[in-house]
Image: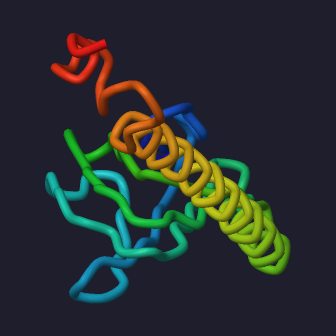
């Protein structure tokens, strides 16, 4: 019987992969590409934006593009990847398309967030100016000494 490993890939919002039937894993860290087989020594490393590949017990290859993350091997059979963002794919060409789509969606979400931030900032500035500019017959702030003179 061939030894198996388990793999889990998680982001802060979801568990993307949890499989207990993995034969091998390939990933990349700052030192280069590396592979993990059952019985590997415990390992903890940081992954840059890269693609993690693993082979399941039935021989199927799976892929996950990670933005960056932490890769760990424990007990020679438990692989865990924690990352900010990840995109799963069954084939590299499909994964590439998914990564581009996810990147475009993230860019659009960032743009919308910046626009909303600018709107809120402008609103706060307008409200501050209303309080700081004295109007006819009232002070700069409610309850200011100018209000007592009326």
The answer to which image quadrant residue 65 occupies is bottom right
Instruction: Give the vertical position of 49 relative to 88 (above or below).
Output: below
List x then y, in percent, for residue 137: 42, 26
The residue nearer to you, when weighing 59 against 81, is 81
Q: In the shown orientation, is residue 57 left or right of residue 48?
A: right
The answer to which image quadrant residue 61 occupies is bottom right
| Quadrant housing the C terminus | top left
Q: In the shown orientation, is residue 1 left or right of residue 16?
A: left
Residue found at x 35% / y 53%: 38
The residue nearer to you, when weighing 25 against 47, is 47
Residue 1 in view in this figure: no
Instruction: Return the residue found at the far front.
Output: 150
List x then y, in percent, for residue 131: 38, 34
Colour mapping: rainbow
List x then y, in percent, for residue 64: 60, 61
Residue found at x 38% / y 25%: 138
Instruction: Give the vertical position of 109 relative to 91 (above or below).
Output: above
Residue 132 in view in this figure: yes
Residue found at x 76% / y 61%: 105
Instruction: Give the vertical position of 139 relative to 51 (above or below).
Output: above
Residue found at x 72% / y 50%: 58
Q: How many marks?
A: 0
List x then y, in percent, for residue 33: 36, 84
């Amino acid at each position: 019987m061939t030894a198996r490993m388990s793999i889990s890939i998680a982001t802060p919002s979801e568990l993307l992969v949890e499989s207990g039937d993995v034969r091998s894993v390939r990933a990349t860290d700052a030192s280069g590409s590396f592979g993990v087989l059952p019985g590997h020594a415990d390992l903890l490393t940081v992954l840059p934006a890269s693609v993690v590949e693993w082979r399941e017990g039935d021989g199927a290859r799976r892929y996950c593009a990670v933005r960056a993350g932490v890769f760990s091997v424990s007990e020679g059979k438990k692989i865990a990847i924690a990352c900010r963002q990840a995109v799963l794919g069954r084939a590299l060409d499909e994964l590439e398309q998914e990564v581009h789509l996810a990147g475009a969606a993230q860019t659009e979400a960032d743009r919308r967030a910046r626009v909303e931030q600018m709107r809120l900032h402008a609103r706060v500035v307008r409200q501050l100016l209303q309080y700081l500019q004295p109007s006819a017959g009232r002070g700069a702030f409610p309850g200011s000494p100018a209000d007592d003179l009326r």
